[in-house]
Amino acid sequence: MDPFLVLLHSVSRHLSTGELADLKFLCRGRVAKRKLECVQSGLDLFSVLLEQGDLERERPGLLRELLASLRRHDLLQLLDDYEAGAAVGAAPGEADLRVAFDIVCDSVGRDWKKLARQLKLSEAKMDGIEERYPRSLSERVREALRVWKNVEQEKATVARLMEALRTCQLNLVADLVEEAQQAQGSVSGHGEVSTMLWESAVTSEAP
């Protein structure tokens, strides 16, 4: 089955009735009122957006904006996995990076631009992120990290992220990331899959 449709189905399953109503409200300027009245699930809404060309496999930015408005970090991570081409059983390095991203998103706050500059994001890119997420510092951080990862690909590693954090004098955040890496190493050393730590983090963030 198409991985993007699998993603949409998964997102739809995890939306509450209230969240679906919020998404329909946000899409009023894109979807005709008559069509919105027929929407009974997230999948219905996504199907309409796909038909209209507002949502595409190669450009899932609208989906990211909608999920960010709901503050559903767990569903945003599913989208991150899709865009990175990551399966549930991602490589340990990928899982390590996702855990590091969560820590950084929760801890950096107003220093996000300092970190973004260290990760070589342009001022224009940062302005775009700020405009897209005007009320959520954590989502600005997450988007900056996502952009960095997409640009750097395999060069985007936990070690490089920690180096950038320390260069920005965000040593406490770097220490938290390092501690998480050590904890994951301990789990892996006992024969457990390292993604378990990531799944635990996602579960704890879910509303």
Image (cartoon, grey):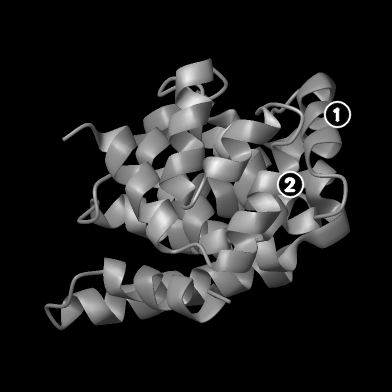
* Residue under the image location 43 percent in, 53 percent down: 11
In the image, what residue type sits under mark 2?
A: Phe
* Residue under the image location 56 percent in, 38 percent down: 63
Which residue is identified by label 2? 25
The answer for how far apart the CA atoms under marks 1 and 2 are is 26 Å
Looking at the rendered image, the quarter that the N terminus falls into is: top left
**Residue 164 in view:** no
Q: Residue 156: horizontal and vertical position, in percent? A: 47, 38
Q: Along the line of sight, which residue is nearer the eye, 106 or 81?
A: 81
Element type at mark 2: helix
User: On the rendered structure, is 29 left or right of 127?
Assistant: left
Which residue is identified by label 1? 127
Element type at mark 1: helix
Vertically, is 31 above or below 102? above
In the image, what residue type sits under mark 1?
A: Asp
Q: Residue 70: horizontal and vertical position, in percent? A: 67, 58
* Residue under the image location 43 percent in, 54 percent down: 12
* Residue under the image location 86 percent in, 29 percent down: 127
| Tag nearer the camera, 1 or 2 | 2
Looking at the rendered image, the quarter that the C terminus falls into is: bottom right
Q: Residue 24: horizontal and vertical position, in percent? A: 66, 46
Tell me which corner region of the image, top left, top right, bottom left or bottom right, holds residue 107.
bottom right
Vertically, is 83 above or below 195? above
**Residue 27 in view:** yes
Badge count: 2
Tag on residue 101? none
Q: Along the line of sight, which residue is nearer the eye, 91 or 83?
A: 83
